[in-house]
């Protein structure tokens, strides 16, 4: 599914030197390694503030808490994402409200959000939290309009979308604030857990910095109850090195995605429909966006059998996500029943993410597509 050794091999010396530097200076938590990475990240994304933190989950919580989302408020998000998109809302003390996805992009649908906002029984909504799923920006035109019309805060879950763009603007610079994850499988990855909040709002940046250090503005003077959500110097040093390469890696991911498209079409497997019949529905780049292909997720009918077939042949694949969030045991208390979000539920039965990473070779992709062709025949 992912061979990180291929990324590490050419960077080995450079990474060791960066790590060695931190060991020499002993700046293990925050300090200059983190500040230097934050400055470089700000510049690359074109945002006013980038604040490193301990994980993508903490970045979501920090962004929500800094924006004043807490008890008595509600946040609208998607049922088709990683668990943290919803659990961070609960951790902030707010109520998650879900709306269905657009079946073509798998992203939260602005139209579905609008109908949820129009419901009389939905009260207290203060924010929308769209996820840029699989590396493609959510429909920001729609969310921006809703935010303006209804006075709502927009928080991007950009965990999977470092470098992605919507209408020429980078993910992380679109909303009031954004959360990134540098979990080792992400497009820009640490050697452990790490995350970042980005924002163009000075007030939010200041609050995020305060909340990531137990609510301290001045040492041992706690203005609010924050948390320990700081970024390590070692992770920042590693991320700072990798930041120089991530544009190139995203470019390579785009090439890999184009090659999959071509191979599936050449094999006669690609179906031009919203849902699969006998072949596969390919993922696509929505007009006006720049997809960074964190995942290449096809849709197919006999998905589980296909996954077993590939696995027997030593081909990795993954299901992101097999259980929509409203059907998770831990989120039963949200009160949604099966059938509440038909598009998310259907996607969870049909999606299969195929191997994709910058160093994936064409012959390996041919093997993947040939195996899928054999299964479907
Ligand atoms: C969409 C999404 N949101 C949030 C997170 C949480 O990030 P982390 O694992 O760094 O806490 C992830 C990553 O796993 C993710 O994919």
Image (cartoon, rainbow, N blue to C red):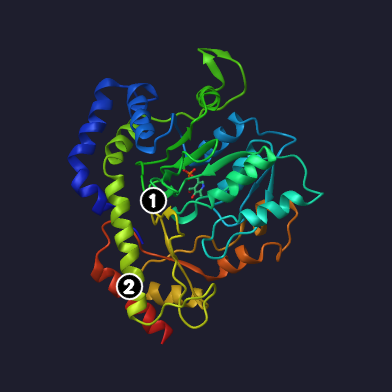
Callout 2: SS: helix
The answer to which quarter of the image holds residue 313 is: bottom left
Residue 73 or residue 22, whichever sits in front: 73
Query: Residue at the spot x=70%, y=64% of the render?
Result: 338
How many numbered marks have been drawn onto this rendered protein structure?
A: 2
Mark 1: is the Cβ under 8 angstroms from ligand 1?
yes
Spatial separation of the CA atoms under disc 2 and disc 1 = 25 Å
Instruction: Indicate the position of residue 197 as horizontal and vertical percent values.
Output: 48, 34
Assign the C terminus to one quadrant of the image: bottom left
The answer to which quarter of the image holds residue 152 is: top right
Q: Which residue is mark 1?
A: 185
Q: Earlier in the sequence, mark 2 or mark 1?
A: 1
Query: Residue at the spot x=78%, y=43% of the render?
Result: 123
Q: Is residue 369 visible?
A: yes
Instruction: Indicate the position of residue 214 as horizontal and vertical percent values.
Output: 55, 22
Left or right? Give the position of 19 relative to 87.
left
Q: Is residue 127 visible?
A: no
Query: Residue at the spot x=46%, y=56% of the render?
Result: 134
Residue 4 or residue 156, whichever sits in front: 156
Q: Residues within 10 Å of mark 1 (few under 14, many from 20)?
A: some
Labels 2 and 1 touching (C-beta < 8 A): no
Image disc number at residue 262: 2
């Amino acid at each position: 599914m992912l061979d990180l050794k291929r990324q590490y091999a050419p960077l080995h010396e450079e990474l060791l030197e960066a790590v060695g530097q931190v060991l020499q200076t002993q700046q293990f938590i925050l300090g200059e390694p983190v500040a230097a990475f934050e400055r470089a990240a700000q510049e690359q994304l074109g945002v006013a503030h980038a604040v490193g933190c301990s994980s993508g989950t903490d970045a979501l919580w920090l962004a929500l808490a800094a924006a004043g989302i807490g008890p008595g408020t509600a946040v609208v998000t998607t049922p088709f994402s990683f668990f943290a998109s919803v659990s961070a809302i609960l951790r902030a003390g707010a109520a998650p409200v879900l709306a269905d996805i657009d079946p073509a992009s798998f992203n939260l649908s602005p139209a579905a959000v609008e109908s949820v906002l129009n419901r009389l029984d939905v009260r207290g909504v203060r924010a929308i939290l769209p996820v840029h799923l699989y590396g493609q920006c959510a429909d920001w035109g729609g969310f921006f309009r809703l935010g303006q019309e209804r006075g709502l805060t927009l928080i991007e879950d950009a965990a999977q979308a470092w470098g992605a763009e919507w209408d020429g603007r980078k993910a992380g610079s679109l909303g009031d604030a954004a959360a990134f994850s540098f979990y080792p499988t992400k497009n820009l990855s640490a050697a452990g857990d790490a995350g970042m909040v980005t924002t163009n709002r000075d007030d939010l940046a200041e609050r995020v910095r305060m909340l990531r250090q137990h609510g301290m503005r001045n040492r041992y003077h706690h203005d609010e109850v924050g948390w320990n959500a700081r970024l390590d110097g070692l992770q920042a040093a590693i991320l700072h090195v990798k930041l120089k390469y991530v544009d190139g890696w995203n470019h390579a991911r785009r090439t890999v995605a184009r090659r999959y498209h071509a191979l599936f079409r050449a094999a006669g497997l690609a179906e031009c429909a919203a849902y699969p019949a006998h072949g596969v529905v390919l993922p696509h780049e929505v007009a006006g966006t720049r997809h960074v292909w964190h995942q290449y997720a096809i849709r197919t009918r006999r998905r589980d059998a296909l996954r077993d077939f590939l696995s027997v042949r030593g081909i990795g694949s993954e299901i992101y996500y097999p259980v929509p969030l409203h059907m998770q045991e831990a989120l039963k208390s949200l009160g949604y029943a099966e059938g509440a979000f038909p598009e998310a539920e259907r996607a969870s039965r049909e999606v299969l993410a195929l191997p994709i990473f910058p160093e994936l070779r064409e012959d390996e992709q041919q093997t993947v597509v040939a195996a899928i062709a054999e299964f479907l025949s």
